[in-house]
Amino acid sequence: MILSPDTRVAVVTGASSGIGEATARTLAKQGFHVVLGARRIDRLETTAAEIGGTALELDVTDEDSVDAFCTVLPRVDVLVNNAGGAMGLAPVSEADLDDWRWMWETNVLGTLRMTKALLPRLIESGDGLIVTVTSLAAFSVYDNGAGYTSAKHAEGLLHRTLRGELLGKPVRLTEIAPGAVETEFSLVRFKGDEERAKRVYEGMTPLVAQDVAEIIGFVASRPSHVNLDQIIVKPRDQANSERFHRTTD
Ligand SMILES: NC(=O)c1ccc[n+]([C@@H]2O[C@H](COP(=O)([O-])OP(=O)(O)OC[C@H]3O[C@@H](n4cnc5c(N)ncnc54)[C@H](OP(=O)(O)O)[C@@H]3O)[C@@H](O)[C@H]2O)c1
């Protein structure tokens, strides 16, 4: 990857769909060279070609994959920890341990691996930014959601701890906590069950990925002394993790 020395680089994990893909497009428009990471390389390559970015295969649950991804980056100014999601919806008494492992590996340890690997280069940039996409689930609990809420709480705590540990270093930290966004999130949670995924957004107007991407773009374009610590964003039709206004009710 050969870039002119003054080109700022933004890394977006989970850029093959939803919020990550929209964020990659938004940051590219703002002048960043965007490096898109995810497992579905074909999708990344299509987007990268459209925005003049770089597509690199990345599995945030795999140490070797993270190492290989990070080694080729010439510099890093912005890291968007977005790769993640939910797997299953079950009471604790019926918890599927593999689903929990998936959620913890992807959301928590994935964010830890990427942040740890790129922190030296974010500091070196002299004006680094880490955006972590957590969720309303990082702030509350809901029935059948403990696997996801516990993972998002842990991811949020990891991110918020860094705010103190990095004080005095040139790195800003922003946590974005969205409510319902219509992406592939529910399709993944319900393991490909399209009907069930569709029902999550029935009778209400959810956020779309672009809504969140524009907020990340706003965060990344503030002057370097301005740190937006936490942003919670929900559809107007959503009061909290469990209460929605639906025309179908
Ligand atoms: N949609 C919502 O309602 C909502 C609300 C609050 C927070 N969030 C959070 O927002 C983030 C983005 O989700 P989304 O809504 O945009 O869902 P999405 O469309 O399912 O996108 C998830 C992205 O994560 C990537 N990913 C999953 N496992 C990965 C792994 N092991 N390594 C690398 N990338 C991986 C996926 O790419 P590959 O499958 O190609 O690897 C995909 O690009 C997630 O952290 C999610 O928890 C979503």
Image (cartoon, rainbow, N blue to C red):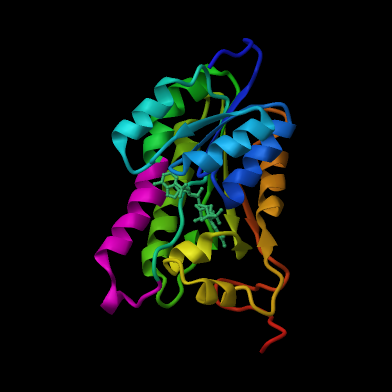
Residue in the picture at 50% in, 44% down? 14
In this view, the residue in front, 100 or 1, is: 1
Residue in the picture at 44% in, 27% down? 118
Residue extending farthest bottom: 249
Q: Is the magenta stretch mostly helix, strand or loop?
A: helix
Q: In the image, which residues are magenta?
A: 89-111
Q: Assign the C terminus to one quadrant of the image.
A: bottom right
In this view, the residue in front, 240 or 167, is: 240
- The vertical placement of 86 against 237, above or below, is above
Whether residue 226 is visible, yes or no, is no
User: Is residue 110 rendered magenta in the image?
Assistant: yes
Residue 210 location, x and y as percent? Answer: 70, 51
Whether residue 155 is visible, yes or no, is yes
In this view, the residue in front, 164 or 228, is: 228
Residue extending farthest top: 5
- The vertical placement of 243 against 5, above or below, is below
Residue 47 location, x and y as percent? Answer: 62, 38
- The vertical placement of 12 against 119, above or below, is below
Residue in the picture at 65% in, 17% down? 7
Residue in the picture at 70% in, 39% down? 26
Q: How many marks can you see?
A: 0
